[in-house]
Image (cartoon, rainbow, N blue to C red):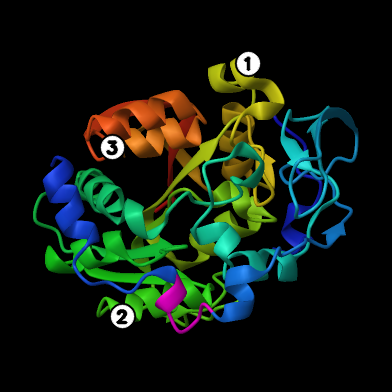
């Protein structure tokens, strides 16, 4: 089945002790980072919403999916596209609302109550898990090429730069780009120089990359195919665009419905796997392969996002909050797209 394109190209846009040691090494916390002003720490960050169409196929034909009224950013209206099955916010937050959100306390440090879980429960506290996941992800990227090859890697929405730092330590030429003032300041405080800019607007000149990586963020971009087109433009022939995403209708959503933690203010769209693959092929990529997303998690992160508060309390009392394990994440896919030679 070939899905309609609808003119996307013209649209805009080790264990608990080890974990504790890594997160308590004197790094500045959110409230101490220069980019995190008093205003951003305390603001509600109420969104401004704008009407939109489907992020993949541009169709306006859709049915109501969920209306969620518990967030202070505003009521969220998720609808389901009749053409490709994408579930997306309409109206959706505008670009300035998203920019402010990524510099706010709402994004970096949420409480464990479900009505306030808008972003990360504790971004700084999760640095250990990001490092562990970066190790596995970098090894996977290296496996795409002959052993020993020095890769040119770009990490989009890189945060504090855990993967970038690890790649540089392994001898690769790696850059990261993020438009969040706080993320950029946090990376600098950790000794990393990254690109502080909007990926879609930044001019990379003649630079070409072997791999462009986007983990844990494509569902937050207003136009994912614009991101794909930009990645395609800056990849060297034969290079890879690696992106993970959340799809609708997964087991967690079937069980939790509108209470599924993914349905929150910064999530713009959830993309069916087949449609996501086919529209990227229409952009110009070859679809290389698809895998279930596998991540390293700690007990407090897993039960915190699932909002299982009795288990959170139990693991905390037993001293198991930072105990970690690697599991496949239901509802998450990892896609590998290749630029033709």
> Quick one: SS at disc 2?
helix
**Residue 40 placement, left or right of 244:** right
**Residue 116 placement, left or right of 308:** right
The one of 325 and 285 positioned closer to us in this rendering:
325
Q: Which mark is residue 119?
A: none
Residue 228 at x, y percent in the picture = 56, 54
Q: Is residue 60 above or below residue 18?
A: above
**Residue 99 placement, left or right of 65:** left
Residue 167 at x, y percent in the picture = 21, 62
Q: Quadrant of residue 160?
A: bottom left
> Of the residues tagged 3 and 1, which is closer to the observer?
3
Q: Quadrant of residue 59?
A: top right
Label 2 belongs to which residue?
Answer: 189
Residue 34 painted magenta: yes
Nearer-N-terminus badge (1/2): 2
Residue 173 painted magenta: no
- How far separated are the C-alphas under marks 3 and 1? 27 Å
The one of 1 and 84 positioned closer to us in this rendering:
84
Specify whether residue 35 is in view: yes
Q: Residue at x 38, y 39 (%)?
A: 301
> Of the residues tagged 1 and 2, which is closer to the observer?
2
**Which residues make up the magenta segment?**
31-36
Magenta highlight: main SS? loop
> Of the residues tagged 2 and 3, which is closer to the observer?
3
**Residue 121 placement, left or right of 13:** left
Residue 94 at x, y percent in the picture = 78, 63
Nearer-N-terminus badge (2/3): 2
Q: Residue at x 65, y 52 (%)?
A: 266
Q: Which mark is residue 254?
A: 1
């Amino acid at each position: 089945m070939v899905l309609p394109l609808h003119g996307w190209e013209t649209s805009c846009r080790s264990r608990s002790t080890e974990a504790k040691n890594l997160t308590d090494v004197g790094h500045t916390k959110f409230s101490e980072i220069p980019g995190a002003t008093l205003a951003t720490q305390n603001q509600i960050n109420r969104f401004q919403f704008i009407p939109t169409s489907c992020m993949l196929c541009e169709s306006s034909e859709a049915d109501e999916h969920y209306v969620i009224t518990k967030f202070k950013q505003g009521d969220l209206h998720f609808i389901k596209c009749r053409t490709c099955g994408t579930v997306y916010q309409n109206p959706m937050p505008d670009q300035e609302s998203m920019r402010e959100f990524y510099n706010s306390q709402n994004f970096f440090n949420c409480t464990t109550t479900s009505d306030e879980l808008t972003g990360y429960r504790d971004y700084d506290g999760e640095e250990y898990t990001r490092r562990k996941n970066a190790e596995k992800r970098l090894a996977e990227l290296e496996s795409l090429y002959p052993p020993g090859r020095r890769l040119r890697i770009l990490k989009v929405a890189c945060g504090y730069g855990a993967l970038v730092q690890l790649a540089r330590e392994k001898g690769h030429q790696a850059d990261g780009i993020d438009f969040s003032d706080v993320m950029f300041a946090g990376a600098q405080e950790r000794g990393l120089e990254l690109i502080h800019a909007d990926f879609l607007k930044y001019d990379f000149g003649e630079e070409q990359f072997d791999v462009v990586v986007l983990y844990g963020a494509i569902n937050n971009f207003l136009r994912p195919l614009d991101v794909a087109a930009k990645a395609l433009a800056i990849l060297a022939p034969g290079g890879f665009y690696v992106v993970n995403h959340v799809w609708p209708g997964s087991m967690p959503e079937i069980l939790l419905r509108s209470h599924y933690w993914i349905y929150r203010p910064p999530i713009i769209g959830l993309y069916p796997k087949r449609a996501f693959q086919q529209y990227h092929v229409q952009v110009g990529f070859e679809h290389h392969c698809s895998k279930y997303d596998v991540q390293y998690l700690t007990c407090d992160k897993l039960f915190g996002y699932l909002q299982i508060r009795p288990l959170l309390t139990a693991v905390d009392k037993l001293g198991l909050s930072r105990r970690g394990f690697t599991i496949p994440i239901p509802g998450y896919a990892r896609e590998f797209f290749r630029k033709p030679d």
